[in-house]
Image (cartoon, rainbow, N blue to C red):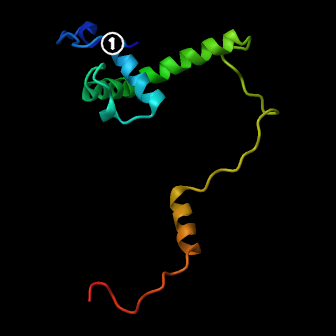
Amino acid sequence: MPAPGSTAGRGGRPEKYCRRAMVDAILYIVRGGTAWRQLPVEFPPAGTVYAVFARWAHSGAWQRILDALRDRLRVRAGRDRCPTVRSSTRRRCRLPIPCSDRAAAGMAAREPAASSGTLPWM
């Protein structure tokens, strides 16, 4: 977990809620797929939990956590912690159409809507 904000050498206000409770609340949201505002009262306030989540996401803490977990799983499975990709094993894949081109292609494929003969603003 990231270091508490009050021990970063800048001083500041101590944390009001346990970081374990914050992690549990974030995992509750992720597992259940619920909205932030539907966080049960057993957890810290949803706004506080979201602020901590956003701060950790912005600092890259979640990416470091996921990288460490992936490395542990790879080692546990008997594979190399840092895999290398050989050119012979890579597959060629089609690149997706960019959003702007996809929208233009979709607009060109649509047929014009039938009009009732009157304009709605007249």
> Is the residue 21 above or below the residue 60 in the image?
above
Q: Left or right of 72: which side holds 63? A: left
Q: Is residue 73 left or right of residue 66?
A: right
Q: How far across and down, in percent of the image, does residue 71 sit?
A: 61, 15
Whether residue 113 is visible, yes or no, is yes
The percent coordinates of residue 18 (x first, y second) are 29, 10
Closer to the camera in the image, 102 or 16: 16
The quarter of the displayed image where residue 40 is located: top left
Residue toward you, 23 or 71: 23
* Mark 1 surroundings: few (<14), some (14-19) or many (≥20) residues within 10 A: some
Outermost residue, front direction?
A: 41
Residue sticking out furthest to the right: 88
Residue 60 visible in the displayed image: no
Which picture quadrant has residue 111?
A: bottom right
- Tell me residue 37's x, y (percent): 30, 34
The location of residue 13, given as percent across then percent down, is 17, 12
Q: Quadrant of the N terminus?
A: top left
Q: Quadrant of the C terminus?
A: bottom left
Side of 49 where 103 appears, left or right? right
Task: Name the residue rendered at 62%, 52% in the picture.
Answer: 96
In the rendered image, which quarter is residue 47 located in? top left
Q: Which residue is mark 1?
A: 19
Q: Residue at x 61, y 11 (%)?
A: 72
Q: Is residue 49 left or right of residue 95?
A: left
Determine whether 115 is above or below 85 in the image.
below
Q: Amino acid at mark 1?
A: Arg
Q: Residue at x 57, y 68 (%)?
A: 105
